[in-house]
Amino acid sequence: MKNKILLIIVSLISISVFSQEYTQTLRGKITDADTYITLPGANITILGTNPLKGGTSDYDGNYVIENVPVGRHNIKVSYIGYEDVYFNEIELISGNELVLNVQMTEDISILKEVVITAKDEMGEPINSMVTLSAQRITIESTSRIAAGINDPARTVQSFAGVSSADDENNELVVRGNSPRGVLWRMEGVEIPNPNHFSNGEGGSGGGVSALSTQVLDNSDFYTGAFAPEYGNALSGVFDLRLRNGNSEKHQFALQLGVMGIQASAEGPFSKNSEASYLFNYRYATTSLLNKAGFTIGNEDIFPEWQDLSMNINIPTKKFGRFNIWGLGGISGSAGEVPSDTAQWLYRSDHFSYSENQLLGVIGITNNYIFKNNRTYMRTVLAYSHTDNGQVEDSLDYQFNKTKLIDQNYIYKNLTASTLVNHKLNSKNYLRAGLIYTNQSFNLNVHQFDWDKEVLNTELQQEGSTYRMQAYLQWKYRINQKLDLNTGVHAMYLNINNDYSIEPRIGLVFKYSEKHRFSFATGLHSRVEPISIYLAQNTLDNGQIVYPNEKLKMTRAAHIVGGYTWNFAPNFSLITELYYQHLFDVPVKVGDTTATVSALNFASGFTSDPFNNEGTGTNYGLELTLDKSFSNQYYLLFTTSLFQSKYSMPGIEERNTRYNSNYLINFLAGKEFKVGKQKQNIISANIRGMLRGGYRTIPVDIEASIAEGKDVRDYSNAYETKTPDYFRIDIGASYRKNNPNWSWIVSLNIQNVTNRANVWGEYYDVERKSVEEIYMVGLIPVLNFKVEF
């Protein structure tokens, strides 16, 4: 270890470098995509090398190809009786070996010895039972997107139908739905919101992702008509996978940047086994950016966060493969009032706050292949713990404090999940699963009542409940052109004895290699945060009632049709038309404003009484033009035209808060090979985002002045919008390959034009005027990373 570090230091300060061709090792495992059995004798060929390089998988499906020149390569994998798999422009660097695991699909053509070409464009979902509205998230694409800061949520904001709700966090608006409808899964089980500075109770986003791409493997993201195995989701699903550490070689990475430090380590436990470890630690803060004049939002805050993620891989001969994996994060921030009251220009200057959050997830997964080589079982046992606290005070000019908010949400989840997948033959596949989640909670919410001038207890509960899910799905490959995916998902919530049964079906018609049609429909549902069911009201006689204890799940019917046209090599045009009908939507009882619907809120707790008399409708058209990475460049253009409406007692139909009507994204990037051997890379990337503004409830300025507080014009709720949102991000990097190690320096700039996008408005009592709230301005992120 010390010798490696010394080698790096000496190489960095050396004034000359010997001109030579650097090489790296490519290794991995070849398996059947449906049964996970290993495929011995598969051929792996690195196209374009001279002489041609390649290898063959051994009895355990493993292959090793040494001395492969660093840079990008096209790789072909073939095996008799299976469809060929192609990987385009896979990058090898001198710092780390590349582990490329390949899953192959059995060919169902009559002539088994004929191999059918099926290019893997790195955009098809990993889950073979998914029909459409799906996108694979590759680690390379995550690191490539300008200002994506290696965040999966910020990466998918470039997909059709997906947008950001706010620059200060990564929550997602999918097809006009509230961000509350997004589900996060890791290693096959649901996990809590995996973000630092969670945006509130029931929220799905946060300020910064607690996940690191150093431990993530290629994963999937879905935007509608989900496969039967996915439950408790209405708008989107992240299905995240962790990669195994290198089982042959110890490897390390260290990154320094303006936002902190990150370090990772991976390698084998023993030369006599495939067992491996993978750890990543990160500490970050925005204090350096703030001191340099780049503020996050409108407040002078100094958030800090740190996280640790891991994956330990332990294969056995008799009991399958075990993985012990985990994610932990701690984050906190505070905002104090200016010490000089002369600086109190706005009403917000009277408020101080602090928030502290803790996230922990640990799990053990067992993958077991039965002796018939047609059945595998995956069993997961996971425990998660979240603790989110927030305190907010109001200060007068004598610095006397009035506590406005004091809330703390503690959840402890124990989840057991088992999945059995059976391959009847090359055409028929069955998959069934059971999921049990026990949720313990300790919830305390105290909020100031301005009318009574007292601090009310709105929630004070401790206990536990459970949720059960079951699913069955069948994939029928009718012929080489037509696939059927069908099944059912069921969910039961113990706290109110509510349940949902959700049939789903999907069809894929592959007319030719250039044209594919797809269709999917089904029912879906999502439970509310436990705190909503346990909200309490105190009556005038002192009696405590629980108005939402019988609240049902929100339900939705999805219908999606799609068409894909691969009109040229590496180019595709994807069109999807969708319709969503949401029903049993929670809405406030007796709401005279006709605005308090679950479809209009991203997060937060309320003790208001709710019923399920609300509905909603989302429909739209999405278009994606994708040029996958080849010839040192890529392009992606997406656009969405849509409507998002809701209704509730007292109003027939109205725009939802997130009905921005249109959305346009553009991404492009180019790589340049430099150096005497053309083994170093300069990369340049750009991303542009344009969408309609989100809907607002306008301030009634006359009523606000008269009453001395912020008063809204509910008669025009969600008829007005913020100005259209527009942002350009850019990124550039330089990678230097050296013998046995490499380094990369990158600069990403979010909102390079420093455009002041408007988030909303409020009435300022001090100034007696309507003030706008702006999103984040220009933010530069500079990093230097070493891999060895």
Image (spheres, helix red, strand yellow):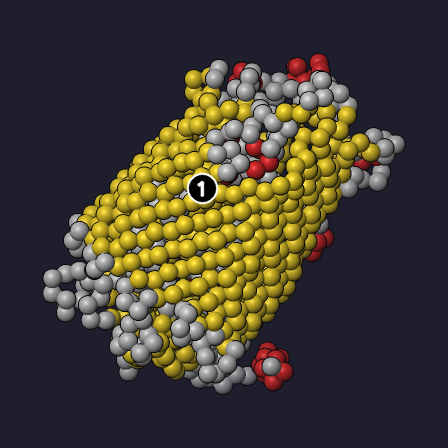
* Residue at 48% across, 83% down: 271
The percent coordinates of residue 293 (x first, y second) are: 69, 50
Label 1 belongs to which residue? 232
* Residue at 36% across, 43% down: 489
Picture quadrant of residue 52: bottom left
The percent coordinates of residue 579 (x first, y second) are: 34, 33
Q: Does 338 sit left or right of 512 as displayed?
A: right
Q: Secondary structure at mark 1?
A: loop
Q: Does 69 sit left or right of 521 as displayed?
A: right
In the image, residue 168 above or below residue 9: above
Quarter of the N terminus within the rendering = bottom right
In the image, 543 versus 572, the foreground residue is: 543
Question: What amino acid type should be assigned to the residue bearing mark 1?
Answer: Asn
| Disc 1 residue crowd, few under 14, some 14–19, many 20+, Cα 10 Å | many
Is there any visible trace of residue 499 in the rendered image? yes
Q: Residue lying furthest right in this view?
A: 398
In the image, 353 versus 20, the foreground residue is: 353
Q: Does 188 sit left or right of 62 as displayed?
A: right
Is there any visible trace of residue 145 in the rendered image? no
The percent coordinates of residue 96 (x first, y second) are: 48, 74
In the image, 339 versus 119, the foreground residue is: 119
The percent coordinates of residue 362 (x first, y second) are: 55, 58
In the image, 465 versus 761, the foreground residue is: 465
* Residue at 60% across, 49% down: 412
